[in-house]
Amino acid sequence: MKLAGSILLSGAIVFAVWGVALLQPTPARAITVPTTTKTGEQPIVNNNTVVVSSEGKTSRSDTKQLEALMIEGNTAMLATSQVEQLWRELSNNKQLNQKLVRNPAVIYVYYRDFSANYDSAKVTIGYPTSDLSSTKATTTIASATYDRLLQKKKYTPSQLSKAWQEIDYRRNLEHVIEIHHLSENSEVIATEVLVNYEEQ
Amino acid sequence: MDYLTIPFSVDDIWWLEAFIDDWFFVIALALFVVELLRYAFKKQITRNLLGDSVTNFITLGLFMLLVSFVALAYIAVFFFVYDNFKLVELPPTLWTIGCCIILADLAYYWEHRFLHKNGFAWATHTVHHSSPHFNISVAYRHGPLDWLFPLFFYLPLALLGFHPFIILLAEVIVQVYQTLLHTETVKKLPRPIETIFNTPSHHRVHHARNTQYLDKNYAGIFIIWDRLFGTFAKEEEKVKYGVYPQLNSVNPIKVFFSGYIKLVQQISTVSSWADKFRLLYKPPLWAWQQTQQKKNSESN
């Protein structure tokens, strides 16, 4: 074959193989690498008295109204420093991940029922039920006005941990929600953290 | 099939690339020892073979020294193109890696063909071909600019949306496969393998200086490229290795720079500026023909 013909044929091969790469099936899948979040950097609590690590309450004053939202995922009562374990469980939850009808755009981490010293909570990590073909054991994120602890942005794990130190633990903490926004490749591209205090 | 589309993290891909790069060298050294034992058993070990092998590894050291200066810039170019000009973003899955290996192998074919058809590029690649022997150590016989030319042929893959680490991984896989072909220990493999894949037999042909084998079998992994593009030759006649004229040296410095020293000498001996320029881009065969014509005209 002449050089020009070989180059043309190569071009055709490149486009064919590239097409195969583009058309690869993209089954909906869970996030594979948890980038979370809380470490053991909790406020120190003695005898049910919360000692806040920084003066005053959170400096962020903007709020977000969240409508009631159903999610399904993995739930556990655990030390908030061990949430990564729950991420792994979600990632390995074959039954749930097979129910995904599309690549999820968000993953919610929902903290509530905090222990008295705030070092453990009931945590659910899951997908919105709208991303699932069927639902079984759903968790409802309560509709409420949440204080925005972190704006939607890409954060490092240490920045996320630090945000937890800015929660006003003197008020009765009711819910914390981390919303992890995912790319097409299921990598976390942005996170926002919302917090809700009990009415006093 | 699900496993084909499970995304890796790019860190995993980088780790895999580094792992293959590091550990394959250890495996290659072990294979080389086996080859030496075979030569010893057949009473074919000579001082020249040992000297040539040591030289091959020294050229690898010199090459790695040069690579250490340019590696970051090399990777940065891929990231610059990928971050600013990629047409799409392909997910880091096994599926994508498989496609990238096929395209990287095609890129390798064209890069390799270019190295044989361009005077300036041949000056670095001739080092690899200048050994009169053929064993695993020859795979590590490098010229000073061997790192430069792959850049131009693999870079379009970044434009197509393959992550730079996936491209580097594919490049390493093609290179590793190629390295394994440098052996006389394996004669011929089963026919279906010889039909689709590049094999030691096909690559012995590529390293030959027998006339009918010149400029044949450029493939990396798949010999089908040569079959498609008309550059395939089957190993029939016994192969004579090396380049013409033979280098006849085991001095690593002389070997490492032999191609460019020869090119500079050729450029300095021709008087016309057009011919000096032609020596840089014309195939090495053209340069050889010019030398023969000059010799003939001088003898007449």
Image (tube, coloured by chain):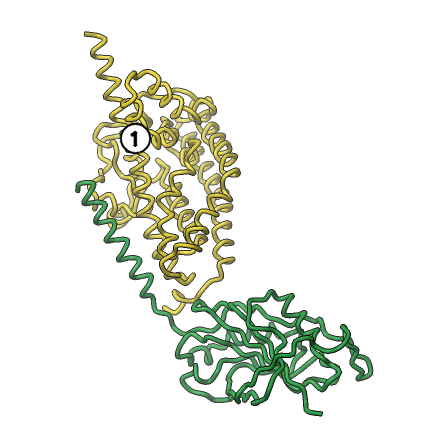
Chain colours: A green, B yellow
Which residue sits at x=30%, y=32%? B118
Which residue sits at x=56%, y=85%? A65
Dot 1 corresponds to which residue? B281
Viewer-side residue, B34 vs B15: B15
* Residue A53 vertical placement versus B294 (above, below): below
Viewer-side residue, B108 vs B131: B108
- Return the x and y of residue B213 as percentages of the image width and height: 24, 32
Left or right of A8: which side holds A185? Answer: right
Viewer-side residue, A179 vs B225: A179
Left or right of B263: which side holds A137? Answer: right
User: Where, quadrant-wise, is the C terminus of chain B in this rendering?
Assistant: top left
**Mark 1 belongs to which subunit?**
B
Left or right of B23: which side holds B81? Answer: left
- Return the x and y of residue A46 as percentages of the image width and height: 81, 80
| Residue positioned most to the top | B300
| Residue positioned most to the bottom | A200
- Return the x and y of residue A169 as percentages of the image width and height: 73, 81
Could you tell me which secondary element the residue under label 1 belongs to? helix
Viewer-side residue, B197 vs B226: B226
Residue B46 appears in the figure: no
Q: How many marks?
A: 1
Residue B111 appears in the figure: yes
Q: Amino acid at mark 1?
A: Tyr
Which residue sits at x=69%, y=75%? A59
User: Where, quadrant-wise, is the N terminus of chain B in this rendering?
Assistant: bottom left
Which residue sits at x=44%, y=34%? B37
* Residue A184 vertical placement versus B128 (above, below): below
- Return the x and y of residue A182 as percentages of the image width and height: 48, 71
Are there few (<14), some (14-19), or many (20+) residues within 10 Å of tag 1?
some
* Residue B210 vertical placement versus B158 (above, below): above
